[in-house]
Amino acid sequence: MRPRRVSVLVAAVVAILAACSSAATPIASPSPARSPSASSSAALSAAGAPLTVFAAASLSGVMADVKAAYEAAVSGATLTVSTDSSAALATQIQQGAPADVFLSADTKNPQTLADAGLTDAAPLTFTKNVLTIVVPSGNPAGLQGPADLARSGVKVIAAGDDVPITRYANQLVANLAGLSGYPSDFIARYEANVVSKEDNVKAVIAKIELGEGDAGIVYVTDAAASTKVDQIAVPAEANVPASYAGVVVKPSAHLDAARAFLAWMAGPDGQAILARYGFLPPS
């Protein structure tokens, strides 16, 4: 199997999500007043307020376009965006950081905030992603397929244990270990090859781009955004759908505006921007 770029993976996305449909269910449905229909002009007319949005590192590119589009669409709206690992951002919110909206690369971190009474409503799944393996451009280590993640001497770059991409990657590795042709100790050999654990998925990509590692497991969207990595396709039956959920942070001074923004992200305008970056519909 030779490395390939994201364009060859697009046709497999529907099959991946169909195979994992039980994991792709939004964790909660918003109340009618806070559903994506709130992105109507009537709702947005009252949404012009300064908002601080905490967003997963894998949304970094998306949020630049979201900021421009939302501020153009909503008179008086301004977005200040901060990106990092979802786990780090959730911790900051728990410690009192002044965020209005939290867009996470998983459902776990928003649910943790909801369970602590720190959100205005249940988390809303607004997009999805899938995984791929990246190698430095030209694939200097000569990886031929996912099985080579466990090959002796291969340097794997991963993220920290609390970072969502790590949970997804570990599930992918476990799924691969169950496929025919993979050694019984595949998981242990993969873990032995991990040479560093980075703060977030963007840092994983950066190290692979610099050739400081031979391979890493990241989101398809991050791989597509880089011109300095090649991809090794992941078997559809082993891939893991990543559900992204958002919440309005309850202490926000602009709750109506924050609700309107989250609904806009889940609505047609936000979805169009996410799709341009390779993200998938929430259902």
Image (spheres, helix red, strand yellow):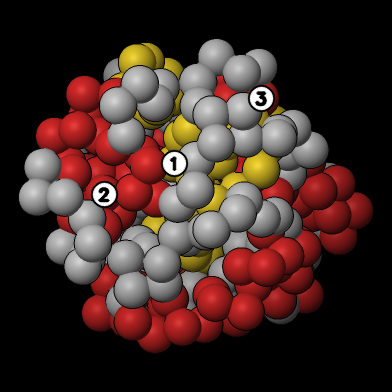
Q: Find disc 3 in the rendering and name its residue.
A: 209
Q: CA distance from mark 3 to mark 2?
A: 22 Å
**Where on the picture, by quarter, is residue 246?**
bottom left
Residue 172 in which image quadrant: bottom left
Q: Check contact, mark 2 vs mark 1: CB within 8 A.
A: yes
Q: Position of residue 18 (x, y in %)?
A: 39, 85
Residue 26 appears left or right of 55: left
Asked whether 114 or 132 is in front, the reply is: 132
Point out the tag, 2 or 1, that comes first from the N-terminus: 2
Q: Earlier in the sequence, mark 3 or mark 2?
A: 2
Among the two numbered marks 1 and 3 on one chain, the one whose residue lies closer to the N terminus: 3
Q: Secondary structure at mark 3?
A: helix
Q: Which residue is mark 1?
A: 217
Q: In the current view of this chain or complex, which residue is farthest to the right?
A: 72
- Which amino acid does the dot numbered 3 rest on? Glu
Secondary element at tag 1: strand
Residue type for callout 1 = Ile
Is residue 264 at least partly visible in the picture?
no
Judging by the rendered image, the residue that carries numbered circle 2 is 173
